[in-house]
Amino acid sequence: MKKNIFWLIIILIIILGVAQLLLKRQGQPEIQNNTVEIIPTVSQEEEVKSIYPIAEFRQRITKKTFGEYITLENSPVSPERFKGFHTGIDVEYEDVVGEVPVLAVCNGEIVLSKWVSGYGGVLILKCAENYYIYGHLKDSSITKNLNVLRGEQIGILGEGQTQETDFERKHLHFGINKKSADLRGYVQNERELENWIDPLESDIYKQ
């Protein structure tokens, strides 16, 4: 009888020990091949990273700004082909040799991509209610994806003075229209300009 009680106590101790060990292991990272998988955490400040349509976006806006009235006489570009209120901004890359990637500033749908007189390759990206116009791209470089993610490469700049840019200089024309996929780089009155947003005032880059 005493032997049975002794062995019963031993069995209970073993069961309690195993149960305690299992409880300790719950919630611990899984170990595989003697390594522990650690999932890094990202601070809120690191998570909100600005994504611009092209590198050195703000620094290279040196010739045409948003809403500027351009004429053949006052244009910073020579020779000038256009006249009117500028609907976007121009980011200049004449001094850069080689490919310059162009990025999506938001998650959205590409509603137009083709070669257009005055632009060369052009792409329009729709995100929420706004339309983002990218002009002077190398037509063959434009992504074939209909839906793109923020920060995804969607093309490269066309080379200046070639058919890729319709013989314009190497630069990105970037515009934001609030209502439609309007391709116009210039409008003829300020009332029409109300449909456009100054790209330098947009908060899309940090969303």
Image (cartoon, rainbow, N blue to C red):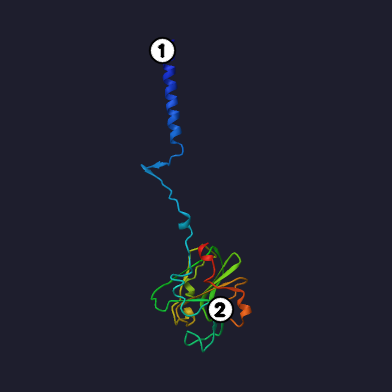
Quadrant of the frame with the N terminus? top left
Residue 69 is left or right of residue 191, and the answer is left
Looking at the image, the residue that sits furthest to the left is 34
Q: Is residue 140 above or below residue 13?
A: below
Q: Position of residue 138 (x, y in %)?
A: 47, 75
Say few, some or many: other residues with alpha carbon within 10 Å of mark 2 (under 14 / 14 to 19 / 20 or more).
many
Few, some or many residues within 10 Å of mark 1 (<14, 14–19, 20+): few
Is residue 183 left or right of 62 when viewed as pictured? right
Q: Residue at x 60, y 75 (%)?
A: 182
Residue 25: quarter of image:
top left
Quadrant in the picture for residue 127: bottom right
Most extreme residue toward the bottom is 73
Q: Where does label 1 land, which residue?
A: 3
The relative height of residue 79 versus residue 94 in the rendered view (above or below) is below
Q: Which residue is mark 2?
A: 67
Q: CA distance from mark 2 to mark 1?
A: 97 Å
Secondary element at image label 1: helix
Q: Residue at x 49, y 81 (%)?
A: 166
Q: Nearer the viewer, mark 2 or mark 1?
A: 2
Q: Amino acid at mark 2?
A: Gly
**Where is residue 114 shown, x and y percent of the image?**
54, 74
